[in-house]
Each structure stands twice: as structure tokens, then as C-alpha cells.
Image (spheres, rainbow, N blue to C red):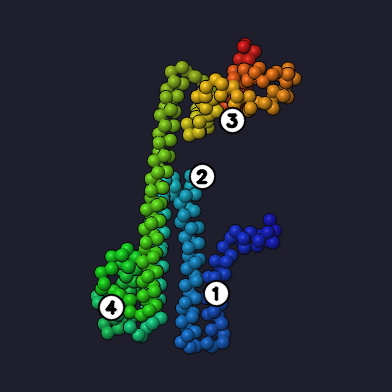
């Protein structure tokens, strides 16, 4: 693959636009240093553009955690964690990253409005002295931001930390909407997860029980190892699929004879026309012949079933 195709793939299916947005703060900072831009609004704009780098964090979250967790081929954590556990870890990680970013956004708003009154001034348990939360230890600042985000997003709202400026009120409303959306998403995802997990567990249990029965039968009949592998391979490839999707033979067996003949005639009409010995049959003869046919599904890679069918036809 040449450079042009790589670039096209990167733009169309890669992370080109996310990377461009993440680079904007760096370019802006270079311009500020090169042209000696030092004023209040320029610094605020630079602080705001730093939020664009969070878009890259979302992409890295998927690459570093989600892909490594649910990767195929039996690698990563998926070898040791069940499907339900994997979805649980992904949900916990995604919520943690979201809460962290919202807490950082709350602190950014507080710094942009400093030294005026902000929501940070309402934190009564800050140990920063006269400076309040702004001069408190970083761990305490992060805890206060996370506390405000969680109490607002979950609708708890103790009222001890409240917005003061219009921007903070808008931010609080965003937290509420995010909290409602996140709760609805988690409930819907958990419901779907439990449904899928129950269905997958039921299918896996049915296969294990069937394979146990087949294995006992193969041992009881002293079936050779090579032939036993062929039998178990059939059940792994075909049997479980047949349990989920009714076979054509099962559907035909449920139909009454008159419907079975009409449906079968429609299905094999082209085959009857292609065979010279059968092309002259009238409608009743075709329907009678078609009603006697039985659909048979052949396992992948199996020539023996075809030979068996030919022997049955010859015997008939």
C-alpha cells in the first residue's frame, strides 16, 4: 500500500479529524509565543482550546482499553473474564473517564472566572485558607470537582456546592443532562447485556450437554479417534446452528402433504425442467414427485453424506 492510499485511509477511516483538533492547542500556543501574545482573552482562549485534546483521549480509551479487552484470538483480558465481566469493565471505565473529564471541565470554568466568585468558593470544607479551594492541595481540588459533578449528574443535589455564575449554571445543566443520558444508557445496555448473556449461556449449556452425550456414546461404541473428531466437528459446526435456526427439513415436516408438494414443486421447478427425463411431467406428476423429496443439509467439507444419499437413491 503506497503513501497515497495510506493517507486516504487515515482521512476516511482513521483518526485524522480527531488528531487535527487535538493539535490546534499546540499550534495556538506556538503562535502565542512567536508573536508575544500576552493578554487576558488570549490566555482564556488557549485554556478553552485545551479541551479539544480531550477528543483524542476518547480515541485512546478505545484503542488502549476496549480493543485490548474484547480482542479476538483469545488474547488480552478476554481469556480470563467472562462476557458479562468484560461489558462491566468497559462500562466502569467509560463512566470513570467521563466523570474525570467533567470534573476537569468544572475546574477549568472555576479558573477562568477566578478571582471572581465561582462555585469553588461554596466548598466549605476546603483547607486552602483565604484562597479557598483555589489554593487547596490538588487532591482536594480534584475531590471537590468530582463531588460536584457526581452530586449534580445523579440528581442528589445536597446544595452545599452550587453554581454562582451563568456559565456555571449552564455547566450544571449539562451535568444533569449527561447524568440522565448516562443512566438511561446504562439501564438499556445492562438489559440488552443480560438478555444476550442469558441466550449465550443457554446455547453454550445446550452444546456442552450435547457434546457430553455424544462423547459418552463415542466411547461406549469404541469409535476410532479420527472418526470421533469428525463427529464432534460436525456438532460444533452444524448442530448448534440448527438449534438456533430451524432447518428446511423440519419446516417441511410440519407442512401438510398438499402444501408440502406445492412448495417443493416451486422450489425444484428449475431442476425438473433441466432434467430431460422429468421435463415432460404434468403438474400433478411434478407435485407428486416433489412431495416425496426430503431436504437434506450436508455438513461443510463432507463428501460422505453425498455418497450416502446416492446409495439410498440407488437402493430405492
Q: Quadrant of residue 268?
A: top right
Q: CA distance from mark 2 to mark 1?
A: 38 Å
Q: Earlier in the sequence, mark 3 or mark 2?
A: 2
Q: Secondary structure at mark 1?
A: helix
- Residue 215 image offset from top left, x and y in percent: 44, 24
Q: CA distance from mark 1 to mark 4?
A: 34 Å
**Callout in the foreground (1, 4):** 4
Name the residue rendered at 63%, 24% in the picture: 265
**Callout in the foreground (2, 1):** 1
Q: Secondary structure at mark 3?
A: loop
Q: Which residue has dot 3 on it? A: 300
The label on residue 122 is 4
Q: Residues within 10 Å of mark 4 (few under 14, many from 20)?
A: some
Q: Earlier in the sequence, mark 1 or mark 4?
A: 1
Q: Is residue 108 above or below residue 188?
A: below
Q: Is residue 14 left or right of residue 210?
A: right
**Callout in the foreground (3, 2):** 3
Q: Which residue has dot 2 on it? A: 73
Name the residue rendered at 25%, 77% in the picture: 124
Q: Earlier in the sequence, mark 3 or mark 1?
A: 1
- Point out the image quarter for the N terminus: bottom right
The label on residue 24 is 1
- Residue 298 image offset from top left, x and y in percent: 58, 26
Q: Is residue 119 above or below residue 194?
A: below
- Residue 33 image offset from top left, x and y in percent: 54, 84
Q: Is residue 49 left or right of residue 197?
A: right
The residue sitting at the right extreme is 276
Q: CA distance from mark 4 to mark 2?
A: 52 Å
- Point out the image quarter for the C terminus: top right
Q: Secondary structure at mark 2?
A: loop
Amino acid at each position: 500500500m503506497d503513501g497515497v492510499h495510506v493517507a486516504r485511509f487515515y482521512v476516511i477511516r482513521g483518526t485524522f479529524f480527531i488528531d487535527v483538533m487535538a493539535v490546534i492547542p499546540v499550534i495556538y500556543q506556538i503562535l502565542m509565543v512567536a508573536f508575544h501574545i500576552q493578554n487576558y482573552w488570549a490566555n482564556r482562549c488557549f485554556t478553552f482550546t485545551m479541551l479539544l485534546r480531550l477528543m483524542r483521549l476518547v480515541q485512546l480509551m478505545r484503542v488502549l482499553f476496549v480493543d485490548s479487552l474484547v480482542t479476538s484470538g483469545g488474547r488480552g483480558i478476554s481469556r480470563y473474564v467472562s462476557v458479562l465481566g468484560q461489558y462491566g469493565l468497559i462500562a466502569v471505565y467509560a463512566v470513570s473517564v467521563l466523570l474525570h473529564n467533567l470534573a476537569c471541565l468544572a475546574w477549568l470554568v472555576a479558573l477562568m472566572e477566578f478571582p471572581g466568585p465561582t462555585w469553588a468558593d461554596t466548598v466549605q470544607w476546603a483547607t486552602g485558607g483565604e484562597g479557598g479551594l483555589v489554593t487547596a492541595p490538588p487532591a482536594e481540588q480534584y475531590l471537590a470537582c468530582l463531588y460536584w459533578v457526581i452530586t449534580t449528574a445523579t440528581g442528589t443535589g445536597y446544595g452545599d456546592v452550587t453554581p454562582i455564575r451563568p456559565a456555571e449554571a449552564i455547566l450544571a445543566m449539562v451535568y444533569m443532562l449527561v447524568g440522565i443520558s448516562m443512566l438511561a444508557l446504562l439501564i438499556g445496555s445492562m438489559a440488552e447485556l443480560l438478555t444476550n448473556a442469558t441466550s449465550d449461556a443457554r446455547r453454550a449449556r445446550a452444546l456442552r450437554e450435547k457434546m457430553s452425550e455424544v462423547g459418552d456414546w463415542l466411547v461406549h461404541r469404541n469409535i476410532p479417534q479420527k472418526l470421533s473428531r469428525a463427529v464432534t466437528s460436525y456438532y460444533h459446526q452444524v448442530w448448534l446452528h440448527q438449534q438456533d435456526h430451524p432447518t428446511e427439513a423440519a419446516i417441511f415436516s410440519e407442512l401438510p402433504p398438499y402444501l408440502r408438494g406445492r412448495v417443493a414443486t416451486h422450489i425444484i421447478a428449475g431442476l425438473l425442467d433441466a432434467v430431460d427425463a422429468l421435463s415432460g411431467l404434468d403438474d400433478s406428476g411434478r407435485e407428486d414427485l416433489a412431495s416425496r423429496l426430503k431436504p437434506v443439509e450436508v455438513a461443510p467439507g463432507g463428501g460422505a453424506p453425498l455418497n450416502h444419499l446416492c446409495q439410498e437413491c440407488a437402493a430405492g
